[in-house]
Amino acid sequence: MPLEPAAISYVFTQLELYGDFVVSVINKSFFAARNSPKNWHSRIHGDTDIRDAAKLLRMRSALAAPFRMEVDDIPMFTVAEVIELKRVRNEFAHEGRSSANFDVLFSYAADLICQIHFWVLDDEEMIIRWPFRDESEEVDDARELNAMIKEMKQRGEW
């Protein structure tokens, strides 16, 4: 089995779950509406021609909506990253083909996770997501760090 395409499919799934979690926290109505999308990227298509400006603008709007972002605040390269990740994932998952370059696609996924995080990050609050069911010291450490940052901000030290 090709390891790189399988790995990027897994990474994409983790990105999908993270984005869905964030949207469920900040935009509860996004998934509750009638005919609502299944996930935050449902309206972005992997077969979109990135040379078609009108389609890219629609995809940009589709990416902004779940995160309650202004369309102009979504970089066009971010739309292209999502399209490419979906294209490669779909090639592998639905057609068994692979043209994956893991390093590039992994950097896209990491970039998207960071962008989503900073799109919704409030100065006063940090969204903490630990993907495993059990309680973890890492989550507690992150919450403690967040509390320390808040205290430092209140004292004007941050």
Image (cartoon, rainbow, N blue to C red):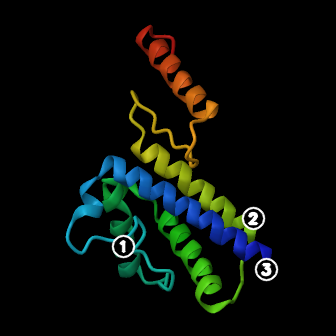
Tell me, yes or no, whether the two marked residues, 3 and 1, touch with CB atoms within 8 Å: no
Residue 39 shown left or right of residue 132 in the figure: left
Q: Farthest residue in the bottom direction?
A: 95
- Spatial CA span between label 2 and label 1: 27 Å
- At horizontal 64% and vertical 72% (from top left) the residue drawn is 9
Neighbourhood count class around disc 2 (C-alpha, 10 Å): few under 14, some 14–19, many 20 upward: few
Position of 138 relative to 48 (above/below)? above
Q: Residue beneath label 1, please? A: 57
- The first of marks 3 and 2 along the sequence is 3
Amino acid at circle 3: Pro
Number of disc labels: 3
Labelled disc at residue 103: 2
Q: Secondary structure at mark 3?
A: loop
Q: Nearer the viewer, residue 49 or 96?
A: 96
- At horizontal 31% and vertical 61% (from top left) the residue drawn is 65
**What x and y, as percent, mark residue 62?**
34, 68
Q: Secondary structure at mark 1?
A: helix
Position of 143 relative to 81 (above/below)? above
Q: Quadrant of the N terminus?
A: bottom right
Tell me, yes or no, whether the two marked residues, 3 and 2, touch with CB atoms within 8 Å: no
Amino acid at circle 1: Leu
Labelled disc at residue 143: none
Labelled disc at residue 2: 3
Amino acid at circle 2: Asp
